[in-house]
Image: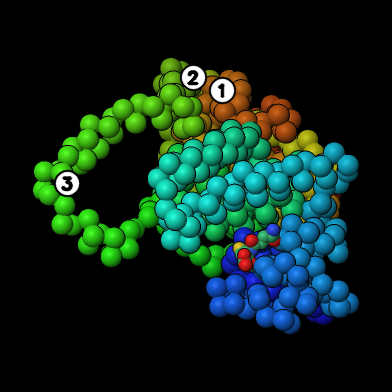
Amino acid sequence: MSSIGTIYGPPNAPKVLRSRAIAAVNGLNLEVKECSPMKGETQTPEFLEKFPTGKVPGFTSSEGFNMFEGRAIARFVAGISNNNNLLGADNRSAAEVEQWTSFADEEILGPAMRLFYLTQGFWPYNKAIEDKQHKSLHRAFHTLQNYLHKQTYLVGHRVTLADLTMAANLQWIYANVVGKGYRDAYPHVARYYDLISHLPQVMKVFGGEKPREENAKFTPPAKEKKEKAPKAPAAAAAPKAEKKKEQPKKAAKDDDEDDEPPAPKSAPHPCASLPPSKLNLEEAKRQYSNLDSPDFFKWFYENYDKEGYSIWRFDFKYNDELTQVFMSANQLGGFNSRLEASRKYILGSGAVYGENNDSVIAGAVIVRGQDWKPVLGVAPDIDSYEVTALDVFGNADDKKFFEENLAWEGEYKGKKFADGKMIK
Ligand SMILES: N[C@@H](CCC(=O)N[C@@H](CS)C(=O)NCC(=O)O)C(=O)O
């Protein structure tokens, strides 16, 4: 495959990585020339002639022109082949792609970068500035967390340049700035990062940096520590005691400042109060995983409880927006993970039928009770699906759909089964 050009910079730097991911998703060959400002490589006459800002990333196209600024390079690479609509399908979505890309850079990467510079000794350390940057970062993660509670992707129902930008930024931030505390406090953000970074094309370029356990912290140079040592023991003890006293106050202040996500409320699931059923769903899940399909359906029909359960199909409403089959499968995977709160009350499958640029998503589920809403309704993106009852015992077509969908075989709307997810 001929190359579209060369990007200069550290391969895993967020503004380089995003363009590499975009090229990978669009099936383009983008070469990388490792180049480090730390080694003075961005200040050579040759570099400055191409890229007058003296910063990475820079890009030289196969046609010979040069470009600087990471966002512009990413925009150019995405636009070379817009089959996947990474730039958005219309004016509004293009603007939304810009909105989230800007948010990813200004609100997420910006404070994270400043924390990195402060804690790693690139800038003079200042605790108040560090706190302020964490506060800004919490605020931005909180916004993102709330948005991703209802959305799989940042714009519409497919991956865009905004997602690849955000995920590249998050990879760097999780690896270099924030620890497990942030991933635990913002689980939708962490799950979203996981989803984007595991897209098959994206995986080819992501994964170069491992997430860190603790937030990056400033460690004073050994010399400064030594200078403090001769102080009188009493004087040294005083600030410590003060600090101890201050801590609870500070924690209370932080709570007031509304920069932490609210604690999740754990109301009992509506299905928890239903009368007992003879069908043990956990056992059904085991049978579904372990038995061949004919044996599973034999077991299932013998053990099913019509009063305690009901059977439904769900159909994605926006099939005409689906592109690559793997992206359709990710859409389905996202829906499945957002059913987490109902995991105990659901068993079934979702499937993608068809091929790239011509696929549909449909699934069949057995849910506790006679109404699908308490179970499927926990997924905030349920509105993207049409849910209808399946009469498995009275309608041959419904039975066929149910069995084929759970068995991951057959055809639907003239399209062959392509990929499936167990919902259990
Ligand atoms: N506005 C530029 C910023 C790029 C940038 O700050 N790059 C840093 C590395 S992350 C750099 O090359 N710094 C070298 C310097 O400041 O001399 C962009 O978005 O691409």
* Label 3 – label 2 distance at C-alpha: 57 Å
Q: Position of residue 85 (x, y in %)?
A: 83, 52
Sort mark 1 into few (<14), some (14-19) or many (20+) by Cα contacts within 10 Å.
Answer: some
Residue in front for this viewpoint, 5 or 45: 45
Q: Quadrant of residue 29?
A: bottom right
Residue at coordinates 71% horizontally, 46% vertically from top-left?
102
Using the image, tell me which numbered label, if any, was put on residue 276.
none
Tag 3 residue: 236
Q: Which of label 3 and label 1 is nearer to you?
A: 3
Disc 3 to disc 1: CB gap under 8 Å: no
Q: Is residue 374 left or right of residue 28?
A: left
Q: Secondary structure at mark 3?
A: helix
Left or right of 251 on screen, residue 201: right
Depth order, front residue of 278/330: 330
Q: Quadrant of the N terminus?
A: bottom right
Q: Position of residue 248 (x, y in %)?
A: 28, 30
Out of 164 and 231, give the one closest to the viewer.
231
Label 3, label 1: how many angstroms apart (C-alpha)? Answer: 59 Å
Asked whether residue 34 appears in the rendered view, the answer is: no
Task: Return the x and y of residue 65 as percentages of the image width and height.
Answer: 86, 74
**Side of 236 relative to 92 (left or right):** left
Secondary structure, mark 2, is helix
Kindly identify which numbered label has been placed on residue 270. 2
Marker disc for residue 374: 1
* Image vertical order of residue 81 relative to residue 344, above or below: below
Residue in view at x 22 percent, y 55 percent? 228
Local crowd size for mark 3, using a 10 Å CA cut-off: few (<14), some (14–19), many (≥20): few
Q: Type of residue at label 1? A: Pro
Residue 253 occupies which quadrant of the picture?
A: top left
Residue 366, horizontal then vertical, whole percent: 57, 33
Is residue 117 found left or right of 1 in the rendered image?
left
